[in-house]
Image (spheres, coloured by chain):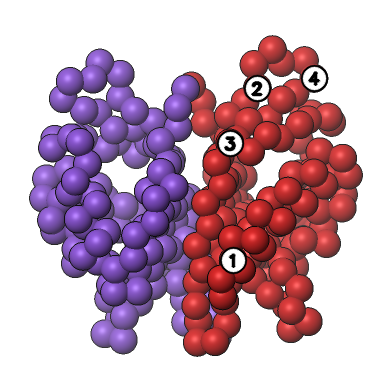
Chain colours: A red, B purple
Amino acid sequence: MGDFNAVSEAFVNHYYNTFDTNRAGLASLYQDTSMLTFEGQQFQGATSIVEKLQSLAFDACKHTVTTRDAQPVMTGQTMSIIVFVSGTIALPNEERPLKFSQVFHLCQTAQQSWFVYNDMFRLNYA
Amino acid sequence: MGDFNAVSEAFVNHYYNTFDTNRAGLASLYQDTSMLTFEGQQFQGATSIVEKLQSLAFDACKHTVTTRDAQPVMTGQTMSIIVFVSGTIALPNEERPLKFSQVFHLCQTAQQSWFVYNDMFRLNYA
């Protein structure tokens, strides 16, 4: 169980790198049961979630993580992980990067690979 | 399971009202297994958590919730709830309120009362 921190670090690096370079590739990180709440709008399932992420008004962006916190969730012998990120998103035509916070709940499939079960995203307006 | 939103709303109101008026009373919302990550510092168990919250440098404060998102987590027939809050904290001697984000994972005890299993708090510096 001590590796929740390492899993969360690897996940966060992979997630935002994929978001910034190959957004369609995020589909493999979600399952049919996955939920996304994006600025209050709700989506369920990998297809709907990635459709939403691909429909965002910017094509190119660059996420920078400022803080990353993680905690394990033990359900019997099964561990899942809640990850809490804050950071910035730089957009091509914006002088100031946008600030955001995001929560992920990472669970394991029957094949023991990690996926995003819960995802909540908010911009932090100054 | 449709009531996760109502539970999260009632919890958030109760939590910040208790924080602002009777901080010691927060102890009843945590259990021995509960975890708090406060600005990156980790605490476990109701006693340590409330000690930390009571040791904060301000006695009086007033939380205002700006956004509250919630999602259910189904583990077999058992539901838990992840709540994601952003808001501000007004302090007596500060002109501008501080911005914060906080994540709670609410689980039920054997007696079916809700408690905070996971709690992660961050100030959002402008």
Name the amino acid, label 1: Phe
Secondary element at tag 1? helix
Q: Which residue is mark 3?
A: A66
To which residue does mark 2 refer? A97
Mark found first going from the N terminus, 1 or 4: 1
The residue singled out by tag 1 in the image is A4
Q: CA distance from mark 1 to mark 4?
A: 34 Å
Residue at 71% over, 66% down:
A115
Q: Are marks 1 and 2 on the same chain?
A: yes
Would you place residue B126 above or below residue A15 in this image?
Answer: above
Secondary structure at badge 2 equals loop
- Relative image position of residue A5 (x, y in whole percent): 59, 60
In the shown orientation, is residue A22 left or right of residue B38? right
Determine if marks 1 and 3 fall on one subunit: yes
Q: Is label 4 or label 3 in front?
A: 3
Q: Is residue A18 shown above or below B66?
A: below
Q: Which residue is mark 4?
A: A92
Answer few, some or many: residues within 10 Å of disc 3's Cα (few below 14, many 20 plus, some between 14 and 19): few
